[in-house]
Amino acid sequence: MDQITAIRQKLINYSHKSEYLLYEQPDLIKSTINELKEDLKHYAKSHIHEVAEYCDKTTLKNWQNDSVKYFTNYTSGTTGKPFSYRIWKDIFLNIEKDSHYGLINREFKLPNHAKVLYLCHNLPETSTNLIDSRKSDNVMLTHGYMHTVDVALKHQLFYNDIHEYIKQIHKICQEKSYEIIMATKEILDPMWWMIEKKKIEPKRLAPLLSCTGNFTPVDLIRQYLEAGIFDNACDHMRCWDGGASFFTCKEGTRHLCDNLSHCQVTHDYKLLSDDYFSLPNPFINYWNGDHAQLIDNYEKCKCGRYFRPFRMFLTEDAGIGWFLNEFPDKSIIKRILTNGRYLRVVIIKPLANETFKRLVKAAYPRHLDIVVEEP
């Protein structure tokens, strides 16, 4: 067996047990990560003369190899212009079913064939009904396993009367029994507003709120948990296009999935990523536009895993990187929210007047709103 074939087989074997790496001692975690990163670079160099230390979209486009079975996917475009990239087909389902959604189901003691209500509005409207029950092998749609999932589609009511739409969704959740509700802030925000205004009752909806994409603010999730609407919540992402992979454990700690990819942060808070399984495309030291804070020392969580504390700067549309580059101290940013022409930055301590004026110019033509909150 040649070395390149051996690396592929090694990764296949590793993928079935990768989640257990985070229970090991930090020295073993670090040495395993270094070994996986070196294998990735060696594999890349076997197909091109040189691997750039800093990988970008041009590198991805210019270097592609057919040495493994792959399928083509497209970025979501949340941190820049969407582009296509390749995913190793033999590994994808192993990771998604076992080390991503399977991990979450086991962490919160949910059945493999849990009843799922999917409220993430990234699907085209295909039915006149509000709820569409379907069988699917889409791992995101079904939370990792092939079974029937109830999907709330982009029904006309969603556009015409969002509050009536949510009332009906809320009623359906009372009539049916779901173990998992997958939702994002476009549903959770107006639903919480209706609960606060006493337009709907704060009744329990499901054992688990599942949020993927890092777009649901932590404070909003906490409000749902404190109100008893969900027993637990898991914010999670398996990023195949060069970003951060993470999940929230039952103790509420957000864990970077160092068993699947390795992230590091530059002095100006750029989040660089190495994906161990990106053999068809080299996500090596790749920056997809995300910014984050990361403490590069392992601590032990009550769940038993070791983790490196980190937080993302929430940039909920494309093109916010340019504004962050003008921000003098990114460590004081709590979150960034955008809505078309408006840009709201929540920080933990006030800015000097001159700094604020400079940021107003940097934000133009958007209106800038700076809000100071407690850390």
Image (tube, rainbow, N blue to C red):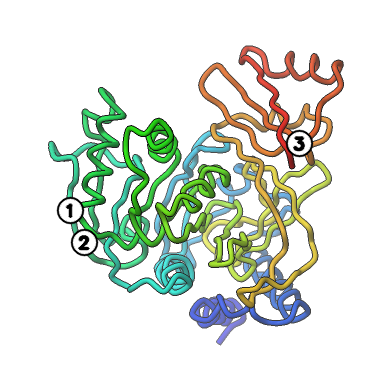
Above or below, 234 relative to 164: below
Taking depth in this image into account, of 183 and 74 the one nearest to the observer is 183
Residue type at the position of mark 1: Ser
Which residue corresponds to mark 2? 148
- For discs 2 and 3, the disc positioned in front in the rendered view: 3
- For discs 1 and 3, the disc positioned in front in the rendered view: 3
How far apart in space, not on screen, are marks 1 and 3 (Cα)? 44 Å
Q: Which quadrant of the rendered structure holds the C terminus?
A: top right
Q: Tell me the residue at 61%/74% (across/down).
A: 303
Pinpoint residue 336: horizontal percent, then vertical percent: 63, 33
Mark 2, secondary structure of its residue: strand
Residue type at the position of mark 3: Ile
Crowding near pointer 1: few (<14 within 10 Å), some, many (20+)?
Answer: few
Taking depth in this image into account, of 24 and 318 the one nearest to the observer is 24
Q: Confirm or deny contact between disc 1 and disc 2 (CB under 8 A).
A: yes
Crowding near pointer 2: few (<14 within 10 Å), some, many (20+)?
Answer: some
Mark 3, secondary structure of its residue: loop
